[in-house]
Image: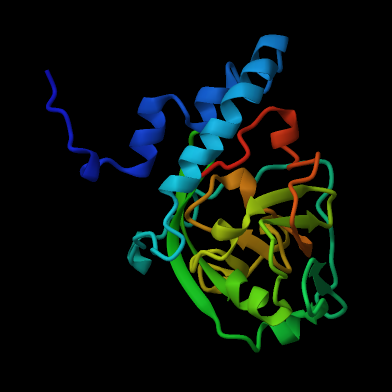
Amino acid sequence: MYPIQSPRHLTRRQLLQWSGLSGMGLLLGGCGATLFSDRLNQVVEPLNQTVEELLLRPDSPVPEFPISAIEPDKLLINTFDVTPQIDPTTFRLTLNGEVNYPMQLSMAELQTMPLTSMVIRHVCVEGWAAIVQWGGVRLRDLATLVQPKPGVRYVYFESADGYYESWDLASSLHPQTLMVYQKNGEPLSVDNGAPIRLASPIKLGYKQSKWVTRIFFTNHLLSQKGYWEDRGYEWFAGL
């Protein structure tokens, strides 16, 4: 028999996997949605979200890797029908919703803000992972500029290709949640989400939107939670 680990030594991922509350455990056979799985998700997803929110440490950084650990060829690029071509000189990132100071920021303005760089593991729900260096602006610094109003609990991300995503506010304000414009020390490429994308070590890859054009702060989780979540994937998707 294997020794039983003390709870204080369990990782967040282990606890979710062993409790059956991980994202893949709820997919029930992939993306195919059956009446049974839909109903089960309606029951289990609120519990799943509650457990993952309790496990989240909003101000505790995830351990990072040295630059020597970067795996430049392992970050796969999911190919869809549309790869938007955005002129970075005219691009504006819109930040609005339930905030005191809605604004639009150019790439030049974003790049004058403090640059945060991190080397983290990007984990895909499909089972692969890659260690990547991302560089950009902390989302919490952008939130400081627009000042979300009391009661805001969620943050939506809209992308130029029609992709949409939503996060809980605590995960959005985590110190390693970035809006990035660099990958492995170089300008972000279009296929990786240029001019700016979302990156964080605390969420699965499908939560990390590319080609972000709008960040929207809101009090309520809308009926459309996210592109893949609306097709059966777990909403919180924490690591």
Q: From this view, report whether residue 193 is shown above or below residue 5.
A: below
Image quadrant assignment for residue 126: top right
* Quadrant where the image shows the C terminus: top left
Number of marks drawn: 0
123 vs 202, nearest the viewer: 202
Image quadrant assignment for residue 143: bottom right
Q: Position of residue 160 (x, y in %)?
A: 84, 57
- Residue name at image x 69 percent, y 81 percent: 145
- Residue name at image x 55 percent, y 39 percent: 49
- Residue name at image x 33 percent, y 66 percent: 66
User: Please, which residue is most extreme toward the right here?
Assistant: 90
Q: From this view, report whether residue 186 is shown above or below residue 217.
A: below
106 vs 215, nearest the viewer: 215
Image quadrant assignment for residue 20: top left
* Quadrant where the image shows the N terminus: top left
Q: From this view, report whether residue 22 is shown above or below residue 109.
A: above
Q: Position of residue 195 (x, y in %)?
A: 73, 69
224 vs 219, nearest the viewer: 219
Q: Position of residue 104 (x, y in %)?
A: 83, 78
**Does residue 194 appear anywhere in the picture?**
yes
Render colour scheme: rainbow
**Does residue 181 appear anywhere in the picture?**
no
Q: Is residue 78 left or right of residue 239?
A: right
